[in-house]
Amino acid sequence: EPEVTQTPSHQVTQMGQEVILRCVPISNHLYFYWYRQILGQKVEFLVSFYNNEISEKSEIFDDQFSVERPDGSNFTLKIRSTKLEDSAMYFCAGTTGVGNTIYFGEGSWLTVV
Amino acid sequence: AQSVTQLDSHVSVSEGTPVLLRCNYSSSYSPSLFWYVQHPNKGLQLLLKYTSAATLVKGINGFEAEFKKSETSFHLTKPSAHMSDAAEYFCVVLRGWGGNQFYFGTGTSLTVIP
């Protein structure tokens, strides 16, 4: 079965550093998402991306965050200047269309120290 | 507005006994509902989904869930728990018309006792 793959699986970074999380979605997916899960808390929506632009974003997704899909394959989440509270598991997801099943990657665990 | 409430943060069952994980939803429209499972150090795996077809939905690994509109519930069940079922389970509602956001419940941690 096709999978959404994410790299790195785990990254430790110093506060204030830039981080890029990468995702390779399933090839026929058109809508892409980032979610995050702070340890012990609910999975939260960050952003959705369609047709090479952001379609929705949450309050969490402030100016420190950006997404892009530069080569039509990799879908990246960039955090420009990490904060301690950015420590979380970040999930990439994709789907073929609105209302269809969303498939998640295994997550990238980010630890900011 | 859409939301889900998972009534139990932790459930413990003996191997071979039934599993019941409870979920109530609120939705302005006829909802699409999902159950996802997260094993330790793993991603979110789809167990099953309800999208206004049959109210009893069968998923993978012997799990099923019944959509009950009158009770606004979508409880997950399995007749006989297996050790490999130990994981975190999330009830999820898809935001309706024109949207594509998932709203996650807070999760239920299932422990299976040998």
Image (tube, grey):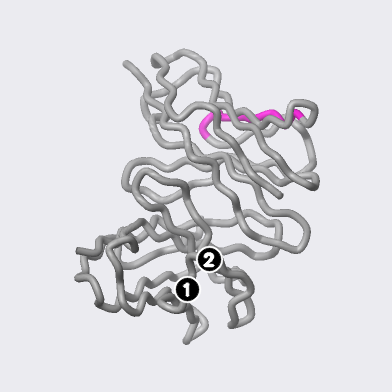
Quadrant containing the C terminus of chain B in the rendered view: top left
Query: Looking at the picture, how far across and down is residue B29, in whole percent?
Result: 80, 47
Residue B36 in view here = yes
**Residue at 74%, 26% in the rendered image:** B71
Q: Mark on residue B71?
A: none
Res B76 → quadrant = top right
Above/below status of B59 relative to A3: above
**Boundaries of the magenta span:** B61-68
Other residues around mark 1 within 10 Å, as few (<14) / some (14–19) / many (≥20): few
The chain under label 1 reads: A
Residue A74 in view here = no
Other residues around mark 2 within 10 Å, as few (<14) / some (14–19) / many (≥20): few
* Predominant SS along the magenta part: strand
Q: Which residue is mark 2?
A: A59
Above/below status of A75 relative to B94: below
Asked whether the residues under the numbered discs 1 and 2 touch, taking CB atoms below 8 Å apart as contact, a structural biologist would say yes
Q: Amino acid at mark 1?
A: Asp
Per the image, is A67 magenta?
no
Q: Mark on residue A62?
A: 1
The CA distance from mark 1 to mark 2 is: 7 Å
Secondary structure at badge 2 equals: loop
**Residue at 54%, 68% in the rendered image:** A47
Query: Looking at the picture, how far across and down is residue A78, in whole percent?
Result: 39, 77
Res B40 → quadrant = top left
Numbered disc total:
2
